[in-house]
Amino acid sequence: MDFFKNIFSIFHKKEEQAMPAPASHEEPIDREIDALYAVLVDIMGTEKLVMKAGKMKALQLMRSENRCDRVLALQRILDEDPLIAPAPKESQLPEVMELLSERTADLVARRSVEDHIEKKVNEKLEKEHQDYVNDIRRQVIKEEKPGAESPQDKKKRKKLEKLEEVHLTQSIMELLRPQDFSEIVGQERAVKSLMAKLSSPYPQHLLLYGPPGVGKTTAARLVLEAAKKKAASPFSEEAPFVETDGTTLRWDPRDMTNPLLGSVHDPIYQGAQRNLADSGIPEPKPGLVTDAHGGILFIDEIGEMDEMLQNKLLKVLEDKRAFFESAYYDPTDEKVPPYIRKLFEEGAPADFVLIGATTRDAGHINPALRSRCAEIYFEPLTPKHIQQIVQNAAAKLHVTMADGVAELISEYTIEGRKAINILADAYSLALEKCGAADSVPVEKIAKGEGPDVAITKAEIYEVAQVSRLYQFVTKKASDKAVQGHVFGLGVAGFLGSVIEIEAVAFEAHEKGKGTVRFNETAGSMAKDSVFNAASVMRQLTGKDIHDYDIHINVIGGGNIDGPSAGTAILAVLTSAVTGRRIRQDVAVTGEISLQGRVRPVGGVFEKAYGAKQAGIKTLIIPKENDKDIPKEHLGLEIHAVETAEEAFDILFEPAEA
């Protein structure tokens, strides 16, 4: 600073020692030069100006007594170029000073803008700093008063509390859900097997197959509660029953959202805790397999679950632990909480018994998973089972039913859950008709203290019409024998059904040139069965199919998948050609060979239910399927035959003497 003051003292001395009458154009220029230096001092400050002059090799020029040198110093400082030379001449000074004045004005303007921006930045920083301090203050208050809440949070809490005060009565399905084994109708063998496998000291993983609405989930719940009470059972009183639906479970390749196996919330994931995200620490979240530890994990519709997820589940079953991985996990980071370190290094416990239920066939389950599970088949419900379920539900609803109501409901469904829904809808209609819904409080109705409510067939028919229900069984057996009509048997999934096959035969106009017509939609396998049957018929009766015009029809159409209708086609073809009448209370299944032998088929157990549904009394099956079905199953008279002649003896009405 002293140095720069000396510089200005030099300027002043030069002015004092100047000629008494300097030229008029020289005095303003000297003042302009001094003024520019003064402006630079205001903008940069004395020290920065001296430092910059030193870098630009302008210090000596600033000390010079020659104003041209001092102007050269200004040029070097303002242009930031130490190589500018030579100094301007006296005649050039006015023009150069004009340029330097403009350059200085630009510098002053830029500095003014920078000062304004700097002020704004400082104000913003100050505000953010104050906000940060306020956040810290609020955090401290929360720590000191954990229950403190903002007015907005308080308003939301009160709204939730008001919602909690509203309660409807339990749903009809909750009310009518089976509470003990006696209410699980028609599944005695399945429940017995389920109990044996779960109450053992070494419980097995299970797969439950069967049609919907037959009690698979309820049976699993009740069996666990019963197993807890057995001394040999490994399940404790606190053993959980964790239920989920396989249709909602999807494999996430990122492992960020996996409710079944568990997931890892990485620091960049929105579900991560703030304190962990700020520290860059991933957090594992155990899934349902860990929730079910020590108990049962029940996966409904496991056949719908993603195949990749089935493979992942298989790994958990083998390890009895669920392991987690994350690229963000650093085992050497001392800031990682102990519980997170334990989850990453040891995994989460997942020792449970898996019970998977499905309405699909076994082909939709991973073979490796199936090999580790025992399999139990729940049986379709018969009309009598449906009637019993309806009667049990009516007792819980405190209603009476007119004669034939339970039987009528059983004609519309073979699902216990659907039967209860039909009854519940009819109950609502009956309640409206008697006026109880308008005058009796819900509490009294729920306790059975309301008026007597009677359900008639009229309510059932009204429910069926509104819900567009149709009778599940439309094919009925009869005691009257008929020519050219036979009941075969088919199966789809876990449900069997009767297949009505009819045939007519006329003598051909020209012998040996008869024609055969058969449903195009029945499939090539069924057509092959027709020609196999024609060969066997010729062996048994001597009748040649080519001497007749024959039309065979599967009533209702549809594809006959497999050769199991062969014996039925042989019987109806023989009846049409010979005129013999077929009993209409008998159903038959079995492939027919060219030697006239009845070969084994699949799905005999399910086909028996189809026969029972249609009112069939007698069932004919291949001899080799005899072991696949209990004697007198479902009250049916079951005959196992080896040849077509044995089947004919039962199928055809005895010839009149």
Image: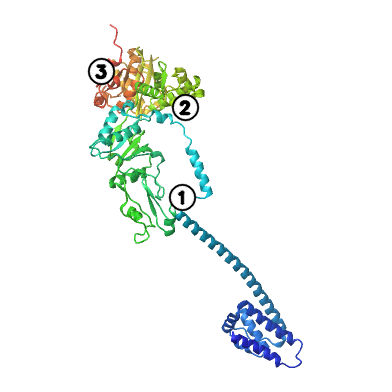
Count residues near mark 2 (Cα–Cα under 10 Å), then give few for <14, some for 14-19, many for 20+. some
Q: Nearer the viewer, mark 3 or mark 1?
A: 1
How far apart are the two marked residues, 2 and 1, measured between alpha carbons?
A: 39 Å
Question: What amino acid is at disc 1?
Answer: Gly
> What separation in Å lies between label 3 and label 1 (alpha carbons)?
85 Å
Q: Position of residue 327 (x, y in %)?
A: 38, 57
Residue 646 disc label: 3
Counting residues from the N terminus, which is met first, the one under dot 2 or under dot 1?
1
| Residue identifier under label 1 | 147
Residue 524, numbered circle: none
- Residue 586: image quadrant is top left
Q: Nearer the viewer, mark 2 or mark 1?
A: 1
Percent position of residue 400, x then y: 41, 19
Would you place residue 273 above or below residue 650 in this image? below
Label 3: how many Cα within 10 Å (few below 14, some 14–19, many 20+): some
Query: Would you call the spot at circle 1 few (<14 residues within 10 Å), some (14-19), or many (20 or more)?
Result: few
Mark 2 = which residue?
A: 442
